[in-house]
Amino acid sequence: MLAAPPPSPAPAPPRPRRPRAFELPEDPQDPTYDGVFDEDYAAEFDEHLEESQSRWRTAVGWALTVAIAIVLSLLIRSFVAHAFHVESGSMEPTLAPGDRILVNKLASNPSRGDLVVFSRPDGDLVKRVIALEGETLYFEDGLLKIGESWLVEPYLSAGTGTYVRSAVPNCDPTEGFGGTEACTVPEGHVFVLGDNRSVSFDSRNFGPVPRENLIGNAALQFWPLGDLRSF
């Protein structure tokens, strides 16, 4: 007679499972919960969770900061100020090629002597306002006269003369003194010249500038840093 086989050993109880990274511990209310809780791991989990949330808050904060900066930059550029790069020597000695200026776009009523930036089909230009609407400008022997007054221009290099190459376009013709070239600036326009009169492309070539083409007044030269100044 064969003996009965020995009973199979009872299976070993399952070992408590350690939660994986970022996994919450088992629910104590679960009937299968074995009562084993790793307090060290719980603290480690809380620390990792706090670090993750902190990184997320930092990333969101930086994204908001960049977005706000971009919006403010666009608003300022569109409505308040505009940086302009001087490319030619037509405004020497006041401005040299490579200079950078900040243009105040809120300045809508320029005065004589102001530096203004205005738009043209071939690009933006910076020039100096010489005559305003309704004023009669005379060119006489290299000098300028507005009405009965000679114009004093301390910003010009010594010996600089102002001459017209031909009849000024888009300018009301006016007979000057003894046949001197002259014109009256139309309503809603300004007459502009470059400080380097012998090379400047200005109102002598294309006529007075409509006010609606004015971008703003030059307010500050910010480059080169050693030449920082306001106008």
Image: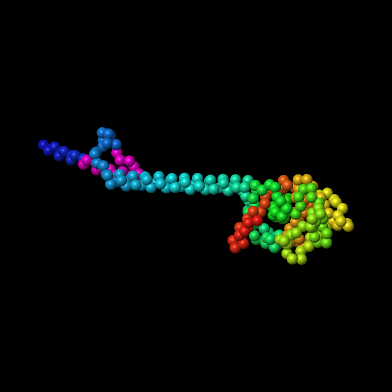
| Residue that extends furthest to the right in the rendered view of this protein | 178
Q: Nearer the viewer, residue 84 or 16?
A: 84
State left or right for residue 143 relative to residue 50. right
| Residue that extends furthest to the front in the rendered view of this protein | 148
State left or right for residue 62 relative to residue 30. right
Q: How is the image coloured?
A: rainbow
Which quadrant of the figure has residue 203?
Answer: bottom right
- Residue shown at 40% from the left, 45% from the top: 53
- Residue shown at 53% from the left, 45% from the top: 68
Q: Give the range drawn in magenta.
A: 12-26
What is the x, y in percent for residue 19? 31, 43
- Residue shown at 76% from the left, 66% from the top: 159
State left or right for residue 13 relative to residue 229. left
Q: Is residue 132 visible?
A: yes
State left or right for residue 225 relative to residue 116. left
Residue 188 falls inside the magenta stretch: no
What is the x, y in percent for residue 40? 28, 47
- In the picture, the quarter occupied by the N terminus is top left
Q: Nearer the viewer, residue 74 or 115?
A: 115
Main SS class of the magenta portion in the image: loop
- Residue shown at 54% from the left, 48% from the top: 69
- On screen, 205 above or below 50? below
What is the x, y in percent for residue 22? 35, 44
Residue 21 falls inside the magenta stretch: yes
